[in-house]
Image (cartoon, rainbow, N blue to C red):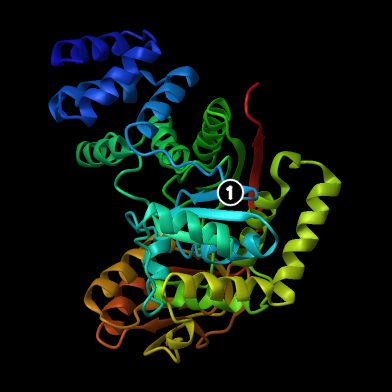
Amino acid sequence: MGAAAAAQLAASKRAGTSHERGEIEALVKGYSDGTLGDDDLLPWLRAVMQSGLTLEETTSLTDAMARSGTMLDWRGVVGTIVDKHSTGGVGDAVSLIAVPLAAACGVKVAKLSGRGLGHTGGTLDKLERIPGLRTDLSVRDFKAQVGEVGCAIAGASDRLAPADKKMYALRHRTGTVASIPLIAASVLSKKIAGGAPTLVIDVKAGRSAFMEDVDSATRLAETIADVGAALGRSMHVLVTDMDVPLGASVGDVLELDEALDVLHGREGGRLYDVSTAVAQAMLAGPHAGRPEIESRAQATVRHALRDGTARLRLDAMVRAQGGDLEAFQRPGQPEMLLFADRSGVVAWIDGKTIAEAVIAAENAESGIAGVRLLRQIGETVREGEPLLGIYGAGTAAVTADRVREAVRITESAPQPGPLILARIHREPRA
């Protein structure tokens, strides 16, 4: 496709006309191979922001982006292959728990992960805090480890959906990110290229997430589920609350440490609940929604945490990727505490402010940097009791100044809402 044809496609989209599959494929191919430049694609992106895409158009875009590079093939690997993705939030260490947990329960988890984006943390950044651990696995090593160990968490190769990487960089630079069809295509293209026939997607909703509005997050979740099913995948999409941080820790080292606590048998809390829900979705497969299957999956997941098999599976995965869990230095006491200036109930925790402060500290610190929440939403606190623990020998004071007003205390407890806001299941179209 040339520049003139791309301009015509943008004009037709502004006019509300739907594209043919071949037109979208030609647009993606032209941008991916350099025939079209940023200035050629940008008018089309802006037209999509204005007029949207139909489900069929979004499916064609996702497929074209996935096929712009290598497509993994899991034939020859015995077992049910599952991949998992989160749209990102604060204190979200779910993958570190759910991946080895689901693998301990019998599924093969081929987790392709990314780095932190904006104020949301990245699974690879957390995992690489384990000394020696590699996440830059070759496709061959990735597939072999999933087959032999049962799970792997690795960075997505540049050969997987390269059109998405190039297009997202342009969208980020030009403010053309907040489009549900474009977000859905970006999320799914890498997962479709990853080849797993079953996908579990955790769409975060709330003020500590990328998608702050619950209605928008639910529309995104439904679009992802429909597009994935149209492309032959068994789709399990959860919409989970991220109004406040999911776990009690913010910062790579602290979040990894908290995930290890859950894998060592610590039950309860929002992180535990979402992690087990995601693992259960991986196990349920095409039978999701059937009460007896869901009940069996729940029991299996909880047993794998209690008897230690999930922790052992993490150990095996870490060793296979060259890491040494015993060499991981678990954090001790914080450098500084912030105290409540009044008595009452914790009504609000500003996760975004805390995360931004922690990211700044991590960029400046060579060791541990982060914030630990010592009180959660709805818990009572007395004046002078500790609210936050600040880590980072060189940056604790600066971090404390940034997060001092991040916890709001009121006289009465807020009414807690549900943690799992929606569950959407779609099987491949016949």
**Quadrant of the frame with the N terminus:** top left
Say if 359 sits above or below 401 in the image. above
Residue at the image position 67 percent from the left and 61 percent from the top: 276
**Quadrant of the frame with the C terminus:** top right
Residue at the outermost front position? 76
Tell me where residue 39 sits by quadrant. top left
Residue at the image position 57 percent from the left and 28 percent from the top: 226
Q: Position of residue 233 (x, y in %)?
A: 58, 34
Which residue is under mark 1?
A: 82
Choose between 83 and 379: the one closer to the eye. 83
Say if 109 sits above or below 391 in the image. above
**Total labels drawn:** 1
Q: Position of residue 420 (x, y in %)?
A: 65, 50
Q: Position of residue 408 (x, y in %)?
A: 48, 68
Residue at the image position 66 percent from the left and 37 percent from the top: 425
- Can residue 191 be seen by looking at this rendering? yes
Residue at the image position 33 percent from the left and 25 percent from the top: 49
Say if 89 sits above or below 360 in the image. above
Q: Is residue 255 left or right of residue 375?
A: left
Tell me where residue 107 sits by quadrant. bottom right
Q: Position of residue 72 (x, y in %)?
A: 44, 42
Choose between 3 and 210: the one closer to the eye. 3
**Label 1 crowd (10 A; few <14 / some 14-19 / many >=20):** many
Q: Disc 1 residue type?
A: Val
- Local SS, label 1: strand
